[in-house]
């Protein structure tokens, strides 16, 4: 019994002593366990990239159809009964400074002379021209060129021609960036190769035209 009591007291003493040592160790190491630095969080913000603004240059439309009216005869009779002014339609396709123009036109006049009634006419269909623009990127530009036409001419002195008619052209085109274009041009043509002819070849013919394209 005595031995049991002594063993119990020794065990409690040992346990108490061990617990005390553990407590001392925990107390001595507690500051190291609970004290720690928290690094401030850093948020990386990526700078917004800015791109240069690219301005697109508006180019003239590459093709358009048009109508035109013109005066194509300097020998206008003084007594006109009926007349059809020079009226034409055409289509123009451009690529850079170059353009191809295809059109047709006609006019007719009926008049009285001392010897009776007479008439004149002029028609061309088709007429194919090549044009070169001097300022192709601008809203307004001069152009020049030439081409060939199939047509017929009858003059006031009864000369008549049907065949191939070469021509040269100079003109000025406006509002090329708009949906409605306008232009004015001067054509000088000369009857050249006849399939049928009455009298001498007609002389050079000048035509001034005003057109509107859509």
Image: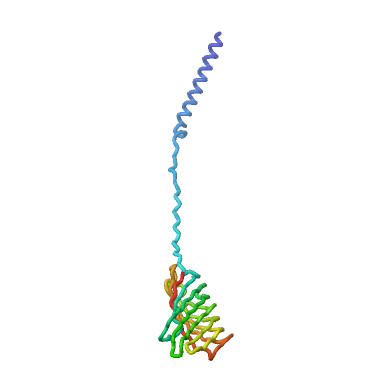
In the rendered view, does 7 fall on the left or right side of 113?
A: right
Residue under the image location 41 percent in, 85 percent down: 79
Q: Is residue 141 visible?
A: no
Residue under the image location 45 percent in, 52 percent down: 46
Picture quarter containing residue 211?
Answer: bottom left
Q: Is residue 190 above or below residue 69?
A: below
Q: Is residue 88 visible?
A: yes
Residue 210 picture location, percent across and down = 43, 77
Residue 214 picture location, percent across and down = 46, 69
Q: How many marks?
A: 0
Picture quarter containing residue 199?
Answer: bottom right
**Most extreme residue toward the top, as rendered?**
1
Residue under the image location 46 percent in, 90 percent down: 115
Quadrant in which the N terminus appears:
top right
Q: Is residue 6 above or below residue 133?
A: above
**Most extreme residue toward the left, as rendered?**
78
Q: Is residue 179 above or below residue 102?
A: above
In this rendered view, identify the residue nearer to me: 18 or 169: 169
In this rendered view, identify the residue nearer to me: 8 or 144: 144
Residue 33 picture location, percent across and down = 47, 33
Picture quarter containing residue 175?
Answer: bottom left
């Amino acid at each position: 019994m005595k031995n049991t009591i002594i063993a119990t007291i020794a065990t409690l003493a040992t346990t108490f002593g061990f617990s005390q040592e553990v407590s001392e160790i925990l107390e001595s190491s507690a500051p190291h366990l609970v004290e720690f630095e928290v690094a401030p969080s850093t948020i990386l913000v990526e700078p917004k990239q800015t791109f240069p603004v690219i301005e697109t240059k508006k180019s003239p439309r590459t093709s358009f159809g048009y109508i035109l009216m013109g005066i194509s005869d300097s020998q206008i009779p003084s007594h006109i009964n009926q007349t059809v002014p020079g009226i034409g339609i055409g289509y123009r396709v451009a690529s850079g400074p170059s353009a191809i123009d295809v059109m047709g036109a006609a006019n007719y006049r009926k008049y009285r002379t001392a010897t009776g009634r007479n008439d004149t006419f002029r028609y061309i269909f088709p007429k194919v021209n090549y044009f070169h623009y001097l300022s192709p990127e601008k809203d307004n530009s001069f152009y020049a060129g030439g081409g060939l036409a199939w047509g017929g001419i009858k003059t006031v002195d009864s000369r008549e021609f049907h065949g191939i008619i070469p021509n040269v052209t100079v003109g000025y085109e406006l509002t090329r960036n708009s949906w409605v274009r306008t232009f004015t041009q001067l054509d000088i043509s000369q009857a050249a190769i006849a399939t049928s002819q009455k009298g001498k070849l007609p002389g050079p013919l000048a035509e001034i035209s005003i057109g509107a394209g859509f």
